Image (cartoon, rainbow, N blue to C red):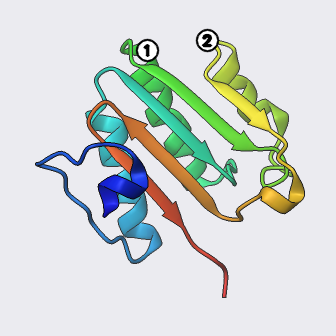
């Protein structure tokens, strides 16, 4: 049934892991970034210059300097109060960062995804 709905053939050897909290999610994200060899495609609603945001940017820049193609899309409403200088470090070396203003009725708060040649992650959470 999943194959019929998705329109793509199922493959063997895949693994699904339920991440139940922030620390588990961040550990999975950083592991996927660290393991990437060819490319990283990441989309996020919120990116701030806090400890996690700084660590994430540092990890992405390390991979980019190692020759991995890094593409990051962030939501311009979710990251509205993030200083522009924070994003500039992702644009100056080689553009890897783009913002997107989505239609307000199509936006998903606190969502994101990260894919590489061997890993795909999707997460969502709500406050409260």
Marks 2 and 1 close (CB-CB < 8 Å)? yes
Q: Please give the residue where the numbered disc 2 appears in the rendered image.
A: 93
**Near-viewer residue (13 or 23):** 13
Whole-Å distance between the Cαs marked 2 and 1?
9 Å
Residue at the outermost left position: 13
| Residue 88 percent location from the top left of the image | 74, 25
Looking at the rendered structure, which numbered label has been put on residue 65? Answer: 1
Q: Measuring 39% from the left and 46% from the top, which residue is drawn there?
A: 7
Assign the N terminus to one quadrant of the image: bottom left
**For the residue labelled by badge 1, is the local secondary structure a helix, a strand or a loop?**
helix
**For the residue labelled by badge 2, is the local secondary structure a helix, a strand or a loop?**
loop
Residue at the outermost bottom position: 128
Sequence-first disc among 2 and 1: 1
**Near-viewer residue (106 or 53):** 106
**Near-viewer residue (105 or 25):** 105
Instruction: Rate crowding at label 2 as few (under 14), some (14 to 19) or many (20 or more) other CA atoms within 10 Å.
Output: few
């Amino acid at each position: 049934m999943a194959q019929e709905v998705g329109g793509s053939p199922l493959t063997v050897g895949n693994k699904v892991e339920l991440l139940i909290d922030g620390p588990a999610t961040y550990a999975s994200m950083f592991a996927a970034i660290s393991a990437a060899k060819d490319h990283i495609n990441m989309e996020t609603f919120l990116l701030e210059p806090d400890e996690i945001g700084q660590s994430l940017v540092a990890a992405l820049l390390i991979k980019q300097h190692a020759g991995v193609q890094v593409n990051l899309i962030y939501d311009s409403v979710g990251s509205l109060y993030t200083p522009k200088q924070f994003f500039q470090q992702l644009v100056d070396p080689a553009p890897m960062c783009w913002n997107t203003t989505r239609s307000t009725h199509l936006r998903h708060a606190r969502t994101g995804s990260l894919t590489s040649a061997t890993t795909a992650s999707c997460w969502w959470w709500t406050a409260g």
